[in-house]
């Protein structure tokens, strides 16, 4: 089974540089439909407008963190099955556990490359 590269992906990060890096990596992997949001609130608005197949969100953002965004997504019956990958600079065990409990599908620690990202996405979406 291979990855469905046609699914829309939403990248959520408050740093434009990180959004650009993620966009480039996703394009390298082969994803064509990539949108972005600069914080959790903007991401929630986009999630209500368009059906995404994957969310890749930074943990540390203001005013709404990636963790809070994840909680909102999991609490929404229209979004609760949406694959969600959290990106963070610090791999604190308590953060990983909290994110897992909140229903995150996978976790990426910065820095990472296209192979790591592809492997994490494949693990979440069931591709190779």
Image: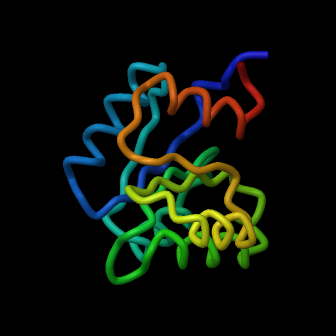
* Left or right of 10 in this view: 78: right
Whether 121 is drawn above or below 76: the answer is above
**Residue at 45%, 27% in the rendered image:** 32
Q: What percent of the width, then of the height, locates residue 87?
A: 47, 53
Which residue occupies the extreme bottom position in the image?
63
The quarter of the image holding the C terminus is top right
Which residue occupies the extreme front position in the image?
93
* Left or right of 116 in this view: 25: left
- Disc tally is 0
* Left or right of 125 in this view: 22: left
Q: What percent of the width, then of the height, locates residue 106?
A: 65, 49
Q: What percent of the width, then of the height, locates residue 114?
A: 43, 25
**Residue at 61%, 35% in the rendered image:** 121
Q: What percent of the width, then of the height, locates residue 27?
A: 39, 25
Whether 69 is drawn above or below 21: the answer is below
17 and 109: which one is in front?
109
Colour theme: rainbow
67 and 51: which one is in front?
67
Whether 54 is drawn above or below 26: the answer is below
**Residue at 64%, 67% in the rendered image:** 99
**Residue at 60%, 46% in the rendered image:** 54
The quarter of the image holding the N terminus is top right
125 and 105: which one is in front?
105
């Amino acid at each position: 089974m291979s990855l469905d590269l046609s699914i829309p992906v939403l990248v959520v990060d408050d740093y434009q540089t990180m959004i650009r890096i993620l966009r480039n990596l996703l394009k390298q992997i082969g994803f064509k439909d990539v949108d972005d949001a600069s914080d959790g609130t903007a991401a929630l608005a986009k999630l209500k407008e368009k059906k995404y197949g994957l969310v890749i969100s930074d943990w540390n953002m203001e005013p709404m963190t990636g963790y809070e965004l994840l909680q909102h997504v999991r609490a929404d019956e229209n979004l609760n099955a949406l694959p969600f990958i959290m990106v963070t600079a610090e791999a604190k065990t308590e953060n990983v556990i909290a994110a897992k409990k909140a229903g995150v599908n996978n976790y990426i620690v910065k820095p990472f490359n296209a192979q790591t990202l592809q492997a994490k996405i494949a693990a979440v979406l069931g591709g190779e």
